[in-house]
Amino acid sequence: MSNTSYPFKENSNVMNVQGGEKKVMKKILTVALSTAMAFSMFASVAFGDTAVTPQQKFDALAAKGIFNGYPDGSAHLEKEMTRAEFAKVITKLLGLKEVTGTLSYKDKGYDAKNWAVPYIEAVTAAGIMQGQDSVKKIFNYNGKVTIQEMATVLTRALKLEIPANPNNNAADWAKGYVQAAIDKGLISKDANFKANASRSQLVEAAYAIDQAANITFTYKVVDPSNVEFTLSTGEVVKVKLDKPLEANKETEVKFKDAAGNEYTAKVTWVVTAATKIQSVSASDYKQLVVNFDGEVDTKTAENQDNYKVTGVTFESATLSADKRSVTLLVKDGSGTLPKQKDTKLEIKGVKNSDASKTFNETVTFTAVDTALPVVKEAKALGTKAFKVEFSEPVTSETATNISNYKIDGKAISGYVKFTYPNIAFITTNLSVGEHTLTVSGVQDFAGFKVSPADSKLTVAEDTAAPEVVSVKTADLTKVVVEFNEPVKSVDKAYHTSSNKTADKIEVKDNKVTLYFTGEGKPLSLGETTIYLQGVKDWSDNSANREAKVTPQLDTERPTATSVTTDVYDNTTKFIVDFSKDVNVKDITNTDNFVLKNSKGEIVTGKGFNTKGHPVKTPYFEVKNGNVNNSRVIIESVGKLDAGKYTLEISGIRDTAYIGNTMLPQSFTVDVTNTSALTVNSVWADVYSDVDDVYVDVTFNKELAIDGTGRADDINKYSYVVNGTVKPFPSKSATISMRDAKTVRITVPKKDISTAELLASDLRVVNVADVDGNYITVGTSKVNDQKTSTVKVNSIKAVALNKVDVEFEGVVTYVNQGDFLFNGKTAVAGEPQYDGNKTTVTFTLNDNLDPVTIGTFATVAAPTSSDAYGHKVAPVAATNIADGIAPKATKAATAVNATYVDVTFNEKVNVYYTPQAFKVYVNGDSVDVTGATVVDNNTVRITLKDAIKSTDVSVHVSSTNSGKYVVDAQNNAAEEIDIDAVINPAAK
């Protein structure tokens, strides 16, 4: 069969018939016949049909007008069929268009009155049948149809490939057609091909074709790259696409069934859930609109903390009615969006509507406001107030100026209550009837004033107090009551009884939100009556209202949607965003957070104890005096080394009255990307044999190579000589990226003073890293490439046989013979580069003295070097810093004692907190009340209750010791569980 395929359910598709240029065949030919070749003309059809006998099949075809019976009403299946009758059956079966007005043959009686002409002309035009004498143009419509002629017609119709070497006893002209039909199982190889075909044989074939024509299929999009088709025969065809489907876009997909028949389907991957962010735009300076290609989850989309623009605080995130766009509102009084410049919006933790995708990406936008604000709506609220809604956010100062509002051209008295960002309620006396409102002087945040225009106010007497429209609650502590008009105030609200008053009442336009958070105040699980007293509208109509509500419990678990990091004042902060407000008791329980390094090892030190728990108590973020109960801050003590970390979070509940607990989650974060972009080093090579000077500038982070912050722009670099800023010659200097963090400036020697360059500081402006963080303008010393070396920053023992040596920048070659520890070499580990510095751990053959530790030195001319060939600077003998953690070696207590003594291997200090120690008696935790140092090496842990049991197993663990138990060098104690020795009973 050829590879040509045709759409399945089109009513007017045509095809190029084999051997001709005419296009007349309908969809039945394109699919029905391509499917029919799986069936033998002389076999029963395996479609589960109810027609079994030839007579039943004839009756089914006759009902469709494909076959006609004889005048006596019988089928006469035993009779042979004429070529004219065959032409009619093929025309009807394949849905060919009957052709009139054309006479292609010259048979006697072949004229417009002959019933067979339209059918003969149809099969002729389709190239399926042709005359028996092409010279005399004789069709021979009364002639009989032989099996080989039948095979030829079907082979042409099915566009079967003709085999090169046919092997059958058909006539020479028919051998190829017959062989093709045999090969496809359409006729038996043992048939008498030259014999006439009976009506019964043609009925069998026609019925198979007709049944195949009725094959339908459905499809299911498993995912964008996989589609499953289910045929009406029950067969399932799985198709893997070379190119993934696009959401909500019709795509043509071709597939074959088990028999090799090809189909073409129009497939649409219907997606209501968002798959991508389509655009981010800002047409004013207070609102940012994020458009998705589908629906997003309401809770995460309306969490304004899931959106971040540097220097901007969002007050709210409002999801549109179709759930496809979010409008972010900049907090009142906190400035505006950056104006007319490329700005990055970071989106994290926003889920689509079916939770199959979480958006964590950064999008660039430019806020441009070119439109004047206009009055979007003006509406009278009875005879004592009116409401004005503007088309965009306007300033409170201008919107609350009563002189900016005139009624019928006259100034009014009263006052304005402005509801940020764009609604003003103006109280003033109005007479019943039509009035003209003129607004002027109200200004947006681009400095544009409202377009002068008059608005009609239709004032009617309002004597009805607000009525309740709906009451909703998602938990037992918060109720939202919607009224039929804007509400001015509510005096009091309570539920069930007057002593269960709302702790807080918020009124915004026509919605009143009630909070019942106090002890004993949350709603019950059943139907509850809400009472509101003194509900007043802007016409001062007041009434008491009540409504019934049945709380719908919040059963959704909270999730941590993202973890990011920032560096402030030498402190690394982990910012954890949750999908909803979470319980303060859980976030202050440091056991719920564990920090690990890139190797999966527990991070200890710098504010994390030996179990990886934070030493400092985590807290909620506070901005502009507002506590954000869905954003948790975890702080280190001192800035963490750059690199990848994993924060494990568990045990956090939400603030629902019946709290839901999160499932454990892990987040990998890159601390490198949170530090400020800085210049690590500047090297100038002025000694090369070529005629150029090379200046290599290495940054601490990967650099942007496009956009406004691109690093390879020569105009962003200059050098400062004695306070004078000198640009590199723009006509001859060039710049290129040497690697992801380094740029190379090339300047002809004739165009620059090398002496001045080596005595200068390099100045860099407007360069950004790949995360969009711009460098702070500053200068860095230009070092001489020939004499510059790599500095050793620190040497610290981390165990008695291990010493960490920290180098400035990236050290790629370490010759362990360059370094001496107490005069001896050690085995060097692999260099660990964190983006700023390199640390190498040396393993010593002999232990260091635990008291004096020892000394470190390099050979006179080290050969160890960085990636650019700079050698490590020589280091004279210097003391190795003590970074070895103190270790508990013994614990002791007694029956009836209220303490446990823990002895360490060196002098320690203790800073007690309730989490510093844990004591277990018979496996159960007991209350610890304090800890003090009783001699240089021993810490006494005091207990709330005396130990009563004579069979006591006490385990002392420095869980959370972190910086609570430290040695003289402030090294945190090592984590350890130790059995206590039980002394005689205390007296």
Image (cartoon, helix red, strand yellow):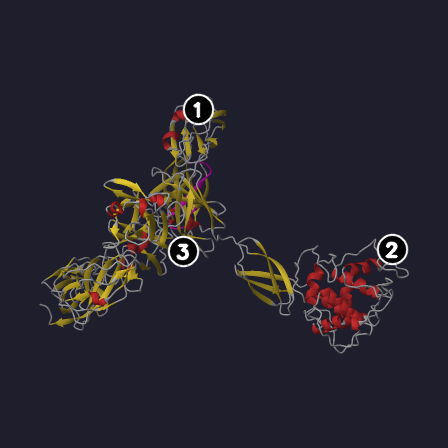
Q: Is residue 454 magenta?
A: no
- Report the magenta residues as a range: 472-486
Helix, strand or loop at mark 1: strand
Residue 826, by quadrant, is bottom left
Residue 449, label in figure = none
The three-letter amino acid code for the residue at tag 1 is: Lys
Residue at the spot of label 2: 112
Q: Is residue 477 left or right of residue 13?
A: left
Q: Cα distance, mark 2 to mark 1?
A: 87 Å
Image quarter where the N terminus lies is bottom right
Q: Is residue 485 above or below residue 690?
A: above
Determine which of the numbered discs, if any, sits on residue 556 in the image. 3
**At which x and y percent is residue 856?**
16, 63
Name the residue furthest right. 108
Q: Earlier in the sequence, mark 2 or mark 1?
A: 2
Question: Percent position (x, y) of residue 629?
Answer: 33, 49
Q: Position of residue 865 (x, y in %)?
A: 26, 61
Determine the image quadrant of residue 916: bottom left
Density class for disc 2 (Cα within 10 Å; few <14, some 14-19, many ≥20) is few
Q: Amino acid at mark 2?
A: Ala
Q: Nearer the viewer, residue 154 or 630?
A: 154
Label 3, label 1: how many angstroms apart (C-alpha)? 51 Å
Residue 273 higher or lower than 1, as above or below: above
Count residues near mark 1 (Cα–Cα under 10 Å), then give few for <14, some for 14-19, many for 20+: some
Which circle, 2 or 1, is nearer the viewer?
2
**Of tags 3 and 1, which is closer to the observer?**
1
Residue 672 shown left or right of residue 458 in the figure: left
**Element at label 3:** loop
**Callout 2: helix, strand or loop?**
loop
* Among the two numbered marks 3 and 1 on one chain, the one whose residue lies closer to the N terminus: 1
Q: Which mark is in front, 2 or 3?
A: 2
Image position of 28 (left or right of 464) = right
